[in-house]
Image (cartoon, rainbow, N blue to C red):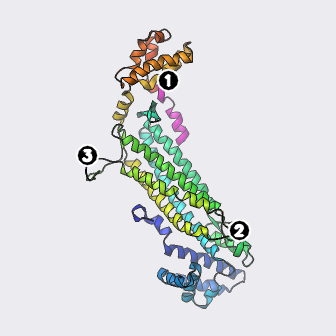
């Protein structure tokens, strides 16, 4: 985790003290149920909770010192608790194995991380919708292969982004449900030394579902799904970021990131206004996606368990969620403050001499009885003259002067095909589909 790209609420989920707090809650809740079942004295859980109520601070350094000797993190934690609670602490962890604590804790952390990420997505969606409605009918050029294609509106560009992030939210909600499972099933997951009701009790207390079959560890296909969804969200962040970066290019300049008073774009060139936020988001997306393959490779553990996944998850759990949280918040700010230039959009629309209307003329010729092959030839030969003139010539004028074209269409019929508003007649329909 790099502090530069981290926000406090998400970072707190992964702090050592928070991890140990969750460990304690799992152990104490399990001891509660074990006491109710008569497996351990009910006084054991009371002793744990009484100590917890009066000693809220976790001594991370003390636990680390014990682990330096034991070489086992869960044993180090249990030893530290026992040193503080006293004799009743010996009833902790009855019939449990380390993975019961570790995997359930990771599920809690990822569930809490998902809650923050879902809130981030809600804020981003709200920002995109506001700007989409603002520019619902702002004409701009649509591009395919980076080349002028046909007119769209800037609102439609943003509506497309909204729909994409809405899908991201749906996927994350599903992935959250997939990952939020509890396993308190003991060695190799058979419940031989602990009753399944303990797992159900702890799951309820920790806000999780039970893992149907844990094989000692929670199956890592759940985790792979979670990180894959984070990777898809990161890719969607990059997609919108790349669009902003292209629109900010000097030759295009239809939109750009907000440039604050006193901001500097280059140490060498005082004139520069660079798309540094969206460039940064492109980079952060790569980091988040970098967690996906390791998560996939964690699925194939040996037999009932091994710990080859453990070291991986200590990296990718915090790094992917913290980075994505930061990236979503940054993108929301970019969208909210994005500078949009409708006049430049119109200028770019007009700069190629009306070529963007070529398809309408092609269709009109075919409907007037000209074969598609001939219609394409007639429109293209005039369009190429405009292209070669870099938009100095007018496609409309060339078509109206072409005898083969005017043999099928009147000058007025040709001119009607150059109506910009024609392209926007279904904008309301698309917006209704996207925003409801």
Q: Please tell me which residue is depicted at 44% across the width and 40% down the height of the picture.
A: 133
Secondary structure of the residue carrying numbered label 1: helix
Image: 240 above or below 222: above
Secondary structure of the residue carrying numbered label 3: loop
Q: Upstream in the sequence, badge 3 or badge 2?
A: 3
Measured as percent of width and height from the top left, residue 237 is found at: 47, 50
Residues at marks 1 and 3, CA–CA distance in whole angstroms: 40 Å
Which residue position is annotated with label 1?
A: 359
Of badges 1 and 2, the one in the foreground is: 2
Instruction: Give, as a single range, the part of the protein colored magenta.
Output: 422-436
Measured as percent of width and height from the top left, residue 16 is found at: 50, 74
**Residue 115 visible in this rendered orientation of the protein:** yes
Which residue position is annotated with label 3?
A: 271
- Check contact, mark 3 vs mark 2: CB within 8 A: no
Q: Please tell me which residue is depicted at 54% across the width and 76% down the height of the picture.
A: 20
- Check contact, mark 1 vs mark 2: CB within 8 A: no
Reply yes or no: does residue 27 show up in magenta: no
Which residue position is annotated with label 2?
A: 303
Secondary structure of the residue carrying numbered label 2: loop
Image: 430 above or below 385: below
Quadrant of image for the N terminus = bottom left
Q: Upstream in the sequence, badge 1 or badge 2?
A: 2
């Amino acid at each position: 985790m790099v502090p530069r790209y981290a926000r406090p609420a998400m970072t707190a989920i992964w702090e050592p003290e928070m991890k140990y707090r969750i460990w304690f809650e799992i152990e104490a809740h399990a001891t509660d149920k074990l006491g109710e079942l008569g497996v351990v004295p009910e006084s054991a859980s009371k002793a744990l909770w009484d100590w917890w109520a009066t000693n809220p601070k976790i001594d991370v350094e003390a636990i680390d010192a014990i682990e330096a000797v034991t070489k086992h993190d869960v044993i180090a934690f249990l030893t530290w608790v026992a040193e503080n609670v006293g004799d009743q602490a010996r009833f902790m962890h009855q019939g449990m194995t380390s993975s019961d604590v570790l995997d359930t804790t990771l599920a809690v952390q990822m569930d809490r991380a998902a809650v923050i990420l879902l809130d981030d997505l809600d804020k981003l969606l709200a920002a995109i919708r506001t700007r989409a409605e603002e520019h619902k009918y702002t004409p701009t050029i649509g591009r395919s292969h980076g080349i002028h294609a046909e007119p769209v509106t800037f609102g439609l560009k943003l509506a497309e982004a909204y729909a994409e992030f809405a899908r991201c939210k749906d996927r994350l909600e599903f992935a959250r449900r997939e990952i939020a499972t509890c396993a308190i099933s003991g060695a190799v997951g058979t419940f031989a030394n602990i009753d399944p009701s303990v797992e159900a009790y702890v799951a309820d207390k920790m806000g999780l579902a039970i893992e149907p079959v844990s094989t000692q560890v929670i199956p890592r296909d759940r985790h792979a799904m979670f990180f894959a969804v984070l990777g898809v969200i990161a890719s969607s962040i990059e997609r919108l970021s790349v669009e902003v970066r292209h629109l900010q290019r000097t030759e295009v300049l239809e939109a750009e990131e907000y440039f604050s008073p006193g901001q500097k774009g280059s140490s060498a060139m005082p004139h520069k206004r660079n798309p540094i936020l969206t460039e940064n988001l492109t980079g952060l997306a790569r980091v988040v996606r970098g967690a996906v393959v390791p998560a996939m490779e964690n699925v194939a553990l040996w037999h009932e368990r091994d710990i080859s996944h453990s070291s991986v998850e200590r990296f990718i759990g915090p790094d992917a969620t913290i980075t994505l949280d930061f990236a979503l918040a940054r993108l929301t700010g970019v969208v909210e403050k994005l500078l949009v230039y409708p006049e430049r959009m119109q200028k770019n629309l007009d700069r190629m001499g009306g070529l963007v209307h070529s398809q309408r003329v092609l269709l009109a010729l075919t409907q007037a009885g000209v074969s598609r092959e001939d219609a394409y030839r007639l429109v293209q030969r005039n369009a190429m003259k405009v292209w070669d003139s870099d938009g100095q010539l007018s496609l409309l004028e060339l078509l109206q002067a072409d005898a083969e074209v005017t043999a099928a269409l009147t000058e007025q019929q040709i001119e009607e095909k150059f109506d910009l508003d024609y392209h926007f007649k279904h904008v309301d329909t698309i917006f209704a589909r996207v925003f409801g």
